[in-house]
């Protein structure tokens, strides 16, 4: 199975490409914005597609044309302007979903935010609410397709080393979770088809990731 | 027919409330953010509802509970931050649509932007594209409801005095149009039911507004 990782150069994305390349049955195609970012992925044996999420759907579709699954883990990040929240977290996600459909690919894994409900938009601090809204509308768009989708809602992301264990359910208590563990959760979701049509929150915990995914 | 004007304190909104109050069969309810804005509308004999578009759906629903139609002409404006583009132009519009449905009101008139197609998002200058995207997603959301909706796509808005004449069609050449004339187009759309399920661009022109609306 070849997996297009959209946002490969992000911190979750880099872990994910590595885990995919370490897996016997999987092959990564890293979608990155600048070809200067390619070396890391080529050294892992991954393919590379240079596409800016602000390009049109056709450009993303070309990157998705020969893959079996698409993972959206791009994010505008805390240091970009609010305009990027609209153009990357919402519009970039929607374009990736539409490009996936246009490419005839069925499997889609979305890395969302911990709580993207209508209530979470209302309750978020003012500076954070546009991001929650962007992720809300991207999730709504994905649910409304007939893609074989999984929506992963991670807790507060850290750069700690992963433990390989998490707590994972439709709703969990808010807590931290290592980006490395989220990358492992994505990998496990890709290889366990019981995650199709599901969405779940993930925080640090005591259950081995494959076990947690399989007992969803 | 009682009409809730969301964004009444904007420049189009103020003209619109005045035209509604001047019309024998119509009554305006002005939705405004601050009660300090109420005097202008009370002097026109309009009702007032003080609701912030960043409030929850229930607050908007209460304002819509006793009306027959809702007009969305709110906008974050050029002087607010990009976060307001997400929270007013997109999320405020979606909340107003959902509040209209929840209130059991069927008629909805959306003041959109001139071109909110996918292509327009891609082609817009970088500083303008988040606004076009916000209006695009709000329009998509509205089209996907079973509300009796009309979507009006005005050209470049000016504060010139209106002429009472426009050019109006599914697509027109880009041009300017007076906010006062857009308010007249909204009024005419409210009283001519052939506009239900339609959307059109409007710029300055030579056709009397009621004639242009009726020959849609």
Image: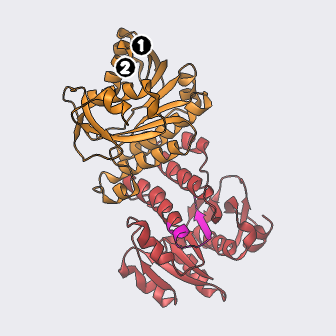
Chain colours: A red, B orange
| Dot 1: element | loop
Disc 1: which residue? B46
Residue most toward the front? B215
**Label 2 or label 1, whichever comes before in sequence order:** 2
Q: Which residue is under mark 2?
A: B17
Query: Which corner quadrant of the image does residue A2 belong to?
Result: bottom right
**Element on which disc 2 rests:** helix
* Stretch in magenta: A99-112
State whether residue B72 appears in this view.
yes
Residue occupying the far left of the picture: B160
Report crowding for label 1: few under 14, some 14 to 19, many 20 or more residues within 10 A (C-alpha). some
User: B48 and A148: which one is in front?
Assistant: A148
Which of the two residues, B199 or B64, is positioned nearer the viewer here?
A: B199
Which image quarter holds the C terminus of chain B?
top left
Q: Residue at x 45, y 84 (%)?
A: A40
How far apart, in angstroms, are the residues tagged by discs 2 and 1? 7 Å
Foreground: B114 or B166?
B166
């Amino acid at each position: 199975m070849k997996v297009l990782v959209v946002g490969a150069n992000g911190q979750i994305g880099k872990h994910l490409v590595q885990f995919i390349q370490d897996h016997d049955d999987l092959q990564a195609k890293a979608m990155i914005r600048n070809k200067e970012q390619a070396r890391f992925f080529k050294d892992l044996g991954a393919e590379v597609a240079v596409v800016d999420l602000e390009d049109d759907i056709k450009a993303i579709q070309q990157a998705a044309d020969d893959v079996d699954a698409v993972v959206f883990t791009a994010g505008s990040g805390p240091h970009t302007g609010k305009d990027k929240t609209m153009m990357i977290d919402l519009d970039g996600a929607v374009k990736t979903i539409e490009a996936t459909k246009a490419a005839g690919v069925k499997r889609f894994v979305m890395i969302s935010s911990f709580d993207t409900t209508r209530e979470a938009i209302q309750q978020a601090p003012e500076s954070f609410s546009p991001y929650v809204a962007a992720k809300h509308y991207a999730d709504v768009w994905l649910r409304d397709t007939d893609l074989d989708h999984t929506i992963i809602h991670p807790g507060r992301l850290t750069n700690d080393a992963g433990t390989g264990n998490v707590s994972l359910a439709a709703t969990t208590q808010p807590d931290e979770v290592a980006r490395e563990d989220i990358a492992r959760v994505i990998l496990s979701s890709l290889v366990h088809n019981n995650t199709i049509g599901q969405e779940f929150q993930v925080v640090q915990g005591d259950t081995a990731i494959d076990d947690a995914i399989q007992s969803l």
